[in-house]
Every structure is written in C-alpha cells, then in structure tokens.
C-alpha cells in the first residue's frame, strides 16, 4: 500500500480534508491498465473518502438516510478517480467535488421523487421552495402569497402555482396515515373512491327491462319465480307442471338469449356513430 502524505500545514487548501495525492495520480496516469493501477486507484479512493463523506453531509435531512447518501458520494468519488487526468492541469479536488455533488444530486433527481414530475416542474419547485424560505417572516408564518413569490422570482403566477403543486410530490404519504395526526381520525385509504357495483346493476336492469317484457309470458313467469321469488327449479316445475330438467333448460336458454341480445344492442350502439358518418359520406350532394 502506498503511504499517502497529507497536505503540508504551510500550504492551505480550499478543502481541509484534501490529501496531497498529486504524485499518486501521476503514477496512475503513467501505468497501463492492470492490477497495479487498480490498487493505486483504490489507495486514492481511500485517501479522498473523508471528503466524499463530508460532501454527502451537505444533503442531510432531505428525505434520504445519510448511509445511502454516503454510498452515492463514494460512487461519485470512484468515478472521479477513474476518469481524472492530471495532464489536464486541474487539481483533483476541483474535478472530484463537482463529480461527487453531481452524483448525489442525480440520485435525488432520479430516485427520490415519489411520482414522476417533469423537469420544468422540478425547477419551478426549487425556485418556489427557495422563495418561500427567503420571504418567510417567521417559522410559524403561513408563507408568502402567490403574487409575492411571482414578484420575487420573476415567474408568472401560473408557474408559481405549478411549482407549489410539485412541492408535495417529492415524498409520498402512507395510505395508512390519518388525516389529522393528533386525532383518532380515519386513514387516507378511506377517502379513496371505489367502483360502485350498483351503477352496473342499474345499467344492466335498464338494458334488460324491454327485452324481458318482450318474452313470452311463460318464460317471464319462470324468470320471475326463479330470480325474484327465489324459488328452486324443482318447485317451479311442480307449480307449472314441468320437470326440473325442463325448467333448467328453459332458464339457461332464456338467459343466453337475453345476454346475446344485450351484447348485440351494445355493439350496435357503439357502431352507430360510424354508420352515421358513412351515411353522410354516401349521401348525394343534392340531398344535403
């Protein structure tokens, strides 16, 4: 392992935790790809690891654990070490810091949003968030109005409202959470709408009513006794003088015929607009 020297106390560096690895990177650049070059790069990563941890600390308390932020920052450091070229003439810290910070910001952009938000909305969110912080009179104030934010940022009020709408998109709330955390309230899941099967039954009954009314009286009576009076097939057969098997065949055939008629009517209603258009296209000019 290479003994990496720390910076001299006589030479101040903009990053207090920046080691002196200039000679190390020159050696890395001079070597071909192989185990030795890989080992030297690992030494460089270890030497600059405290700086990556410090940079990750800038993004604390933003909805991501510090351990995950540290891992993302270290990944950015590894990429910076692999891509750095000392021949360009730029100090490694000047190249590594933007690379690491950019990696962390990309992590927030690509993985931390609870819902997909367009880039423009993200930019507006950041501007509105910054304006809220700068214009807030006190931590307990309700916050500036839309017009104040627009005047402060130079945005239109529509853009401000779009940015405000994106403020709550970064994190998602559990459906098990209550509307009022200080009261024994019902969960958010209870406010979600659901399909009401009653609507489908009402539509089916409206579609079936004229078809049932057009049935022969005997078939209407059998359906009435079976589905409205809840009588068994055997009891219906005894009342009408038929066998249970015959009643079963009549019910099956009648229901199948009604189902086919309802489906045929639905298909006809769906094709009606197309038929109207076709008739208009075929109509002679003199008939218009």
Image (tube, helix red, strand yellow):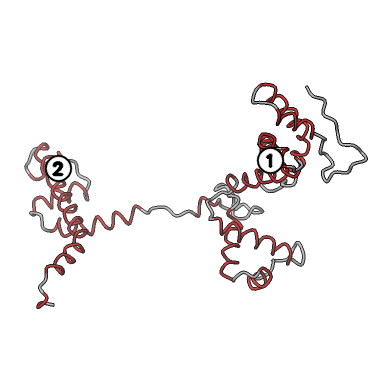
Measured as percent of width and height from the top left, residue 118 is found at 53, 55
Residue drawn at the location 8% of the way across and 38% of the way down: 243
The one nearer the camera, 249 or 4, is: 4
The one nearer the camera, 105 or 91, is: 91
Q: Is residue 263 above or below residue 162?
A: above
Q: Is residue 153 above or below residue 193?
A: below
Residue 54 in the figure: left or right of residue 226: right
Residue drawn at the location 88% of the way across and 44% of the way down: 12
As measured in the structure, the alpha-carbon distance from the residue carrying label 1 to the one carrying label 2 is 66 Å
The one nearer the camera, 26 or 116, is: 26
Residue drawn at the location 62% of the way across and 59% of the way down: 125
- Which of the two discs, 1 and 2, labels the residue nearer the N terminus? 1
Q: Is residue 125 above or below residue 58?
A: below
Residue drawn at the location 68% of the way across and 48% of the way down: 62
Question: Of the numbered discs in the image, which one, if any, rests on residue 252?
Answer: 2
Measured as percent of width and height from the top left, residue 39 is found at 71, 24
In the image as oriented, which residue stretches furthest toward the right?
A: 10
Residue 215 in the figure: left or right of residue 128: left
Q: Residues within 10 Å of mark 1 (few under 14, many from 20)?
A: many
Residue at the spot of label 1 = 69
Residue 115 in the figure: left or right of residue 201: right
Occupied quadrant, residue 283: bottom left
Residue 228 in the figure: left or right of residue 217: right
Secondary structure beneath dot 2 equals: helix
Question: Of the numbered discs in the image, which one, if any, rests on residue 133?
Answer: none
**Quarter holding the N terminus?**
top right
Can you tell which of label 1 and label 2 is closer to the viewer? 1
Occupied quadrant, residue 42: top right
Measured as percent of width and height from the top left, residue 85 is found at 69, 37
Secondary structure beneath dot 1 equals: helix
Measured as percent of width and height from the top left, residue 288 is found at 13, 77
């Amino acid at each position: 392992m290479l003994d990496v020297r720390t910076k001299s106390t006589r030479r101040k560096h903009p990053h207090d935790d920046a080691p002196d690895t200039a000679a190390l990177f020159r050696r890395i650049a001079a070597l071909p790809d192989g185990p030795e070059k890989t080992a030297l790069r690992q030494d460089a990563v270890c030497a600059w690891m405290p700086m990556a941890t410090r940079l990750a600390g800038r993004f604390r308390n933003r909805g991501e654990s510090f351990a995950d932020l540290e891992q993302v920052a270290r990944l950015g450091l590894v990429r910076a070490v692999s891509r750095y070229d000392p021949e360009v003439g730029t100090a490694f810290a000047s190249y590594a810091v933007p690379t690491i910070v950019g990696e962390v910001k990309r992590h927030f952009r690509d993985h931390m949003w609870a819902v997909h938000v367009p880039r423009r909305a993200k930019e507006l969110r950041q501007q509105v968030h910054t304006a809220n912080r700068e214009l807030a009179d006190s931590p307990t104030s309700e916050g500036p109005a839309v017009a104040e934010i627009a005047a402060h940022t130079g945005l239109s009020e529509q853009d401000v409202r779009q940015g405000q709408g994106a403020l709550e998109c970064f994190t998602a709330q559990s459906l098990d959470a209550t509307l009022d955390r200080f009261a024994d309230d019902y969960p958010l899941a209870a406010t979600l709408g659901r399909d009401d099967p009653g609507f489908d039954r009402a539509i089916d009954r409206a579609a079936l009513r004229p078809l049932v009314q057009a049935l022969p009286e005997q078939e209407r009576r059998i359906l009435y006794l079976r589905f409205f009076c809840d009588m068994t097939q055997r009891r219906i057969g005894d009342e009408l003088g038929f066998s249970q098997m015959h009643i079963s065949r009549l019910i099956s055939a009648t229901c199948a015929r009604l189902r086919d008629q309802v489906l045929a009517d639905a298909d006809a209603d769906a094709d009606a607009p197309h038929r109207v258009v076709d008739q208009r296209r075929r109509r002679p000019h003199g008939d218009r």
